[in-house]
Amino acid sequence: MFPERYLANGTSALPDKEIKVKMSSEITFEITAVHSGGLYALQTIVPLSGNVSAYARDTTGFASYNAYLIVEDARALLIDTGFAAARLHLLAALRSLIPPGAKLAVFPLRLGEFDSVSNVRAVIEEFDVDVLYGIQDHGERWIDFIAGDAAVRRHPLEYVKIGRTGTIPLGKRREISVVAPEFRLLQTHWLFDDVSRTLFTSDAFSHLSRPSRSGPWMTKQETLDVVQMRNHLVKTRYWWLPGAIVDTLVSDIDGIFSNFSPNILAPAYGSIIQGEDLVNNQKDEVINILSEESKKSIQDTVLDA
Amino acid sequence: MLDSRAVNPLPRQLVPGLFWLGACFEHPRRDGEVLHSYNSAYLVSGSEASLLVEAGFPGDVDEVVDQIDETIADFDLAPLKYVFLTHQETPHASGADRILRKYPDAVICGDIRDYHLAFPSLSDRLLELKLGQAIDLGDRKFRAVRPVIRDLNSTLWGFDEASRTLFPGDGFAYGHVHTRGHCGCTAEESPSLPLPEMVAMFAEYALHWTRFTDMGGYVEQLKALIDDLGVERIGSTHGLPITDIGKTVPLVYEGLWRGSQLKIEEIF
């Protein structure tokens, strides 16, 4: 007899019938000028109905999945590439934003996740990509998914594995700082652009979904919703926080924010957060939640099945 | 320099109806040793249908597809109808599109979130499994069970009731040493594998959160799951298969505890 405790509440032991779910993506796409210093967000807006892993099953409304493009002189850097469902939109956006003749570097911050890496191959095939950055060994082997994603490269491509810290030169004067944060689930980096003072936080600070497709997907004003923030953390990627030992996480977050003093938080998904006060307000609340969850027990962890 | 992955000992039958597929992934040398890990897939075959656990790492999918064909032909297996994905991470799910194009009667099953965005052409070939629900393969059932050690919270583990094999995705993950002849071997066939150390090392690379928690509670949950299900073998995606629970699993527990104590300077 199968142990009952392993059955979800109200779920029969066998599917009543096989239901093949056709899940329409119904996505839309927006290009957002984040900063006049050549920083753009390429945002895929996705309806939420328990159909994406980045948000809890009971989160409704919409979320933006964000790739970012920084353009400086005759170079550009693409941070994350979005899901395959948005491929055509992404490529069209890049055509409109990348200057003719510019070299492109691509940095998927999470080589292990589809919303970061799905379109790397397509971008390499169309644009003059000379460098692929990543955190994993043999990153060039992590990027092929769709039948027909041929290993044909029109230009020499260098893969650069970045360790715990680093810098990426961009143009004559611009540098992107790279740091591997402690506050993470999977292998990832955070990046900091000193021109726009933007901290690219990968899967962190990603809690701002919206009830409406219209967003806003970049905000300077936000009423702090601690419940939304906490639920997003403990029901999705940071499910392990209850009972965790968070001192290192807190000090690392504080250290990164102190070191870079960001004015903009640019997460991989969720609304972009602008303004020093709002940025610090969001950071402080995340730290508060970490501290509160650490006082709980691992019995309080939630599986979002 | 010779490619350390040049000879692949897989696919391999573990027990009747259960096959181990995949290829080694090479890591930087350490102390003169060549370290590998797996991104394994497993074929579970019943009288009416076969099911693939995991869809492989991007760089391995072509090889895994060949292994599926070879295994189905060599053992006259039932057709592939299900591809169970433990979670939405590229080392586990990358081959979904290529595999389903090759096997038009197959569907993706498990927690199916994200796949309509990652593989838009497959959006009508997704079968959601809830905890405890099972796929009927004819003379055996494959069930979705509660994960314990995981990264994404949308993870499901799988359990083949006939062979009592647990498929824990990122659970029981550890590398192996190519230069000691571990490739294609079970954990028990690899006595020179420093299992606790390898578990600890892999936990930092893949299960960063285990450094910030007391793993004792999670180990107790693992023990309870193994006891309750009557697990007799473990088909980990990233570790060598385990065929002697009593002998090998305690070493994994030790490694999980060690990994939670490591300082970051010891890793980079």
Image: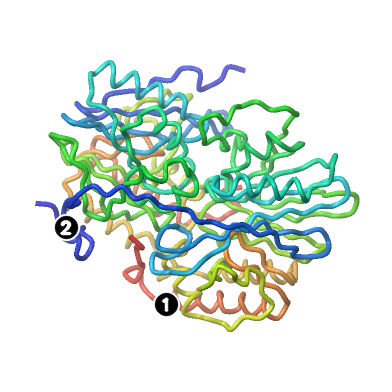
Residue shown at the point (30%, 42%) measured from the top left: B167
State the image coordinates of residue B222 (x, y, percent, origin top left): 28, 54
Numbered disc total:
2
* Residue nearer the viewer, A240 or A109: A109
Would you place residue B176 above or below residue B252 in this image? above
Would you place residue B49 above or below residue A4 in this image? above
Q: Give me the C-alpha separation between circle 1 and circle 2.
A: 35 Å
Of callouts 1 and 2, which one flags the residue occurring earlier in the amino acid sequence?
2
State the image coordinates of residue A130 (x, y, percent, origin top left): 76, 36
Q: Which residue is mark 2?
A: A12
Would you place residue A257 above or below residue A114 in this image? below
State the image coordinates of residue B214 (x, y, percent, origin top left): 39, 63
Contact check, label 1 and label 2, Cβ < 8 Å = no
SS at badge 2: loop
> In which quarter of the view is residue B68 placed?
top left
Q: Residues within 10 Å of mark 1 (few under 14, many from 20)?
A: some
Q: Residues within 10 Å of mark 2 (few under 14, many from 20)?
A: some
Under mark 2, the amino acid is Ser
- Marks 1/2 same chain: yes
State the image coordinates of residue B27 (x, y, percent, origin top left): 55, 34
* Residue nearer the viewer, B141 or B107: B107
SS at badge 1: loop
Residue shown at the point (58%, 49%) measured from the top left: A86
Q: Which residue is mark 1?
A: A295
Residue A5 numbered mark, or none: none
Under mark 1, the amino acid is Lys
* Residue nearer the viewer, B242 or A10: A10
* Residue nearer the viewer, B125 or A157: B125
Residue shown at the point (15%, 35%) measured from the top left: B138
